[in-house]
Amino acid sequence: MALTTSIENFLRTAQVAINNTLSTPEILAIVSEFGYTEAELTKGQKLYDAALAAQQAQQKEYSEQKSSTDQAETLRNQLHEEYMVHLKLARIALDKQPALGQQLALNGRRKQTFAGWLMQVEQFYTNSLNTPGVLEALDRFKLTPEKLAATQAKLPELIAAKDQNEKEKSEAQRATQLRDEAIDALDEWLSDYMAVARIALAQDPQRLEALGIVAPSP
């Protein structure tokens, strides 16, 4: 898509050129002599309609993607905040029991990727809730099985939100591809039409301006 203007401006340029040609019999009569008949202009109109619809669909998909991204990030941040409190307490409680700490992946930095982070979180809560020695140690700080299970129960919602976000990303990318293809098709048609219109209407700058073409000063 070799466009120097924004997509919105490009679509508006196409709309003006096509509409004003079709609605001005004098202009249509002149450009028809150069191959741009009403049928050919109607073809351009269909390309414009397709490009506009594709642009609107792309904007909708990206809005949905952003919404799903925000939701997933909010859920992760909330869960991570609880997890870090539990993790810090567990590090203190199990400071003298490194074997148990290893089962909970207490040491080292938290993973930055979602998959790595999720594995650490799942390991922490699964092994905490299924290891009596850990539960006994955590009870010292009133970190009960109920509290651990309540945070663990938020994981399925987060995973579902992340999966939905990946789906929305894919749909947004596909919508962008379709939009770009539609814009390219319109751009190819419009570039030729504007070039021919400059020739056909070279002696009539006012009609050129009606198509959005500003004739150069002599």
Image: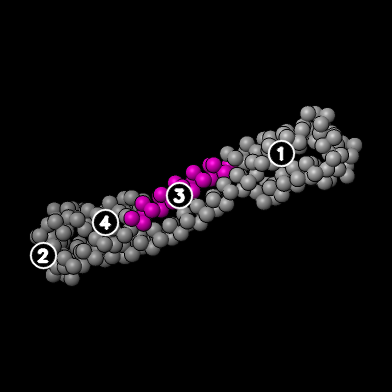
Residue at the spot of label 3: 62
Question: Tag 1: Cα neighbours inside 10 Å, few (<14), some, or many (≥20)?
Answer: some
Residue 104 shows up from this direction: no
- Provide residue 162's location: percent of width, then percent of height: 58, 49
- Provide residue 46's location: percent of width, then percent of height: 26, 62
Q: Nearer the viewer, mark 4 or mark 1?
A: 1
Q: Which mark is residue 29?
A: 2
Going by the numbered disc 4, the residue's amino acid type is Ala
Q: Nearer the viewer, mark 2 or mark 1?
A: 1
Boundaries of the magenta span: 53-73
Question: Tag 3: Cα neighbours inside 10 Å, few (<14), some, or many (≥20)?
Answer: some
- Quadrant occupied by the N terminus: bottom left
Image point (58%, 48%), residue name = 160
Going by the numbered disc 1, the residue's amino acid type is Ala
Mark pair 3, 1: CA separation: 35 Å
Camera-side residue of 201 and 48: 48
Residue at the spot of label 1: 149
Q: Nearer the viewer, mark 3 or mark 4?
A: 3
User: Was residue 85 drawn as part of the magenta stretch in this picture?
Assistant: no
Residue at the spot of label 4: 14
SS majority, magenta: helix
Farthest residue toward the top? 141
Mark pair 3, 4: CA separation: 24 Å
Are dots 3 and 4 in contact, CB under 8 Å? no
Going by the numbered disc 3, the residue's amino acid type is Tyr
Taking the image as shown, residue 82 lies to the left or right of residue 10, namely: right
Residue 45 shows up from this direction: yes
